[in-house]
Amino acid sequence: MGDTMVKEASCLYAARALVPGVRGSCERTGVEMKLSRRTTSVPDRALNRLLGVAVLTLALGIPTFGVIYYRDQHVDAGPTLIERQVQTAEQAVRKAPDNIGLRLQLAQVYQSTKQLDIALKQYDEILTVDATNRMALLGRGDVLVAKGDLTKAAASFQKVVTGAKGGEFSSADPQLQKAQYSLGQIALMQGRAKDAVASLQAAIKIDPTDADALYLLGTADLKTGAPERAVVDFQRALAFVPTGWCEPYSQLSQAFKKLGRTPNAEYAGAMVDFCQKRPADAKRRLQTLTSGPVAVDAMLGLGMIAEKESDRTGAISWYQKVLGADAKNFDASTGLNRLGAGKTS
């Protein structure tokens, strides 16, 4: 189970640190300029992109005007959106190489397109001029994690934490929260669960709604032998993301098993079935729990499944049964509102 947790932490880190949805890789295009002190000349490197479009040789006998018409009508699609973003950021830095804000944007564009080495170089150039630049430290840390250098990444995040100590707004500082979260995630990936707990608790203190941090805190608590606390953490995470997220339910089932709470573990296992697209199995397991100690949770789960399956009547019925047992149940109330069956004033 330990290896699985480490992999989950690694995947979760990548999901938060890098822009999702970017496929393939962009060609490395230059802009390796150093931040100058107004005395360093900056070479303007042209971006190397093939602009020509090969045209198939026309068969002998096709009239010449056909070739002319093809050339007149054929339009090169031009650079992709990602390529244009890279080009724009590079050109902006060439025009103002001392502008840290522009260089940060360039580093982030490289990072989002997974050009990690040149992104790291840009962050390092910023830090040679402004060693405490928190955005550069955070970006550098994310890149180093993606490259697998967890020790150097942790050092980068730690500089943010150290610099923020005693700050007037540290209790609501999103950059500090990000640094603490990242330190906790790295500690968990390195097998230092106790250290992870401390950092993640600090992150959650700043942002109690961070479901990712709550999930990782539960994972760390489970590894340190505190399944009671883990249950609370996972349940808090799932309160913000109740469907479509399998890992918290899976870990919640493990925590309940350690506590000997079999019905609760069965409920969490059924929700894993639902999340993993086995609704028939999930409904079968939940039906057996609708009259026991986890009846409310089981009925709520059945309502969620019915709603997912576009069974409006069934979903409304289950949500109403939940409210019959727990009149203040938020999930059931919002479910009925989504279905247009909520109470009207």
Image (cartoon, helix red, strand yellow):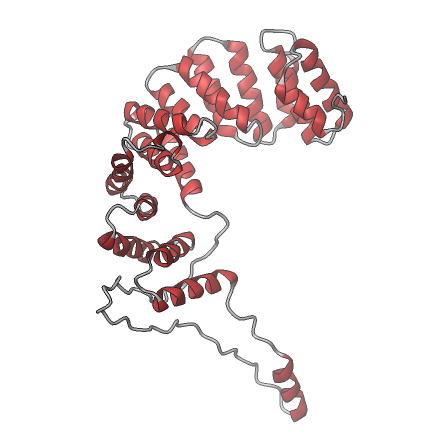
Residue drawn at x 60%, y 31% as measured from the top left: 277
Residue 300, quarter of the rendered image: top right
Q: Residue at x 35, y 68 (%)?
A: 94
Relative height, residue 45 to residue 340 (above, below)? below
Report x, y in % for residue 230: 42, 18
Question: Relative to the observer, which residue lies in front, 147 or 325?
Answer: 325
Q: Picture coordinates of residue 275 (x, y %)?
A: 57, 29
Point 30% across, 45% down: residue: 137
Count of marks overlaid on the render: 0
Residue 72 vertical position relative to residue 194 in the rendered view, above or below: below
- Position of residue 8 in the picture relative to residue 240 (left or right): left
Q: Nearer the viewer, residue 41 or 87?
A: 41
Q: For the N terminus, which image quadrant? A: top left
User: Could you say which quadrant of the image residue 242 lies in?
Assistant: top right
Q: Is residue 280 visible?
A: yes
**Residue 244 position in % (x across, y down):** 57, 32
- Residue 284 in view, yes or no: no
